[in-house]
């Protein structure tokens, strides 16, 4: 494993957003006078990954600190506590790795991870990320729109849904010895949701390759849905005619619907979804319809009662 320290920043450099936010915070603290002297050096856990800034979707919200993003996780293959994945996913072998894309497509194909990293220009996307457990983060992901991959395999007219399947390997994923979920972890989207430009095939965060606990080497991020709709460490993408059954639907059909769009007005069976705690903040904030992405994605559900799309 390599460790990187971030370079001192000159104002002429294009500053990645997370350094910009860190710097702004320090400017507020010290008025900029001794900025260079106190700028902390970040320890990077993974290889760096460069990407251009997306201008359309990047949030201006303050970023959730790297440490929280990489130490407070849900990844049941590595245990059910938030601290488990950072500890237990350390040894996950992420090379070689590939994603099989098949089902209702004209050109089924296996994509190697190295190919994925080069396939389309990588972008940094600062997204709101809302867990069904009523906490949220703001994360600078790196990836490219999933639709770039979908276009290459040419879905047939029968392809109405997309199923994502995570790695199944009890040796590497000790959590799979427990039956808390049915393994492998499976999730799904309607094909128009999967094609939406917000849906990101994600290989990195905070300027580096994905840490294992965040779903290395490749995951999906769907920012207007609850976090469990963003599957980690995926090895297969399958196009289907009928709606796939996700691991969470199987585990709790009354609690986890297929759509699971973030909606402050629809409570979870056991708790309210009206508010959320942004990790690192003290006061709760109001949860936004479609996690604040209504302008971009509400048309996907036009003509239907969004409250019935549970
Ligand atoms: N394979 C797999 N993917 C998964 C999960 C999981 O347990 N296994 N948990 C989901 C849940 S509930 C959430 S909130 C997010 C957490 O992503 P993060 O740890 O990168 O913040 O991953 C989702 N993807
Ligand atoms: Mo979640």
Image (cartoon, rainbow, N blue to C red):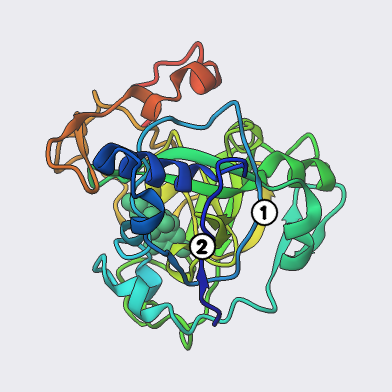
Q: Is residue 117 left or right of residue 44?
A: right
- Residue 135 bears which disc, if any? none
Examine the image and state in which quarter residue 75 appears: bottom left
**Image depth: mark 2 or mark 1 in front:** 2
Between 113 and 278, the one lying in front of the other is 278
Examine the image and state in which quarter residue 88 appears: bottom left
Q: Is residue 30 left or right of residue 70?
A: left
Find residue 305 and report its horizontal and vertical position in percent: 40, 16
Question: What residue is drawn where x is 35% and y is 68%?
Answer: 76
| Residue position marked by numbered label 1 in the rendering | 238
Q: CA distance from mark 2 to mark 1?
A: 39 Å
Question: What residue is drawn where x is 51% and y is 13%?
Answer: 302
| Residue position marked by numbered label 2 in the rendering | 6
Q: Earlier in the sequence, mark 2 or mark 1?
A: 2
Between 66 and 305, the one lying in front of the other is 66
Find residue 96 and report its horizontal and vertical position in percent: 70, 78
Q: Can residue 62 be spotted in the picture?
A: yes
Question: What residue is drawn where x is 44% and y is 20%?
Answer: 294
Figure quadrant of the N terminus: bottom right
């Amino acid at each position: 494993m390599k460790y990187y320290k971030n370079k001192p920043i000159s104002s002429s450099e294009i500053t990645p957003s997370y350094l910009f936010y860190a710097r702004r915070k320090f400017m507020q603290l010290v008025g900029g006078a001794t900025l260079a002297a106190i700028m902390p050096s970040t320890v990077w856990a993974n290889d760096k990954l460069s990407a251009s800034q997306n201008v359309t979707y990047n949030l201006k919200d303050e970023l959730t600190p790297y440490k929280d993003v990489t130490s407070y996780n849900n990844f049941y293959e590595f245990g059910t506590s938030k601290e488990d994945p950072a500890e237990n996913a350390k040894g996950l072998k992420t090379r070689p790795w590939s994603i099989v894309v098949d089902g209702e497509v004209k050109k089924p194909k296996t994509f190697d991870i190295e190919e994925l990293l080069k396939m389309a220009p990588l972008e940094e996307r600062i997204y709101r990320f809302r867990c069904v457990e009523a906490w949220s983060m703001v994360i600078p992901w790196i990836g490219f729109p999933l639709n770039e991959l979908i276009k290459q395999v040419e879905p047939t007219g029968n392809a109405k849904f997309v199923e994502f399947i995570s790695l199944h390997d009890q040796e590497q994923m000790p959590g799979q010895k427990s039956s808390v979920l049915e393994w492998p972890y499976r999730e799904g989207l309607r094909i128009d949701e999967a094609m939406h430009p917000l849906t990101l095939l994600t290989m990195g965060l905070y300027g580096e390759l994905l840490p294992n606990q965040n779903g290395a080497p490749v995951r999906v991020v769907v920012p207007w849905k609850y976090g469990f709709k963003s599957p980690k460490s995926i090895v297969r993408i399958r196009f289907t005619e009928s709606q796939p059954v996700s691991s969470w639907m199987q585990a709790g059909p009354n609690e986890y619907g297929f759509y699971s769009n973030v909606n402050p007005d629809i409570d979870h069976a056991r708790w309210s979804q009206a508010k959320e705690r942004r990790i690192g903040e003290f006061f709760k904030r109001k949860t936004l319809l479609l996690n604040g992405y209504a302008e971009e994605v509400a048309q996907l559900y036009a003509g239907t009662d969004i409250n019935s799309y549970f």
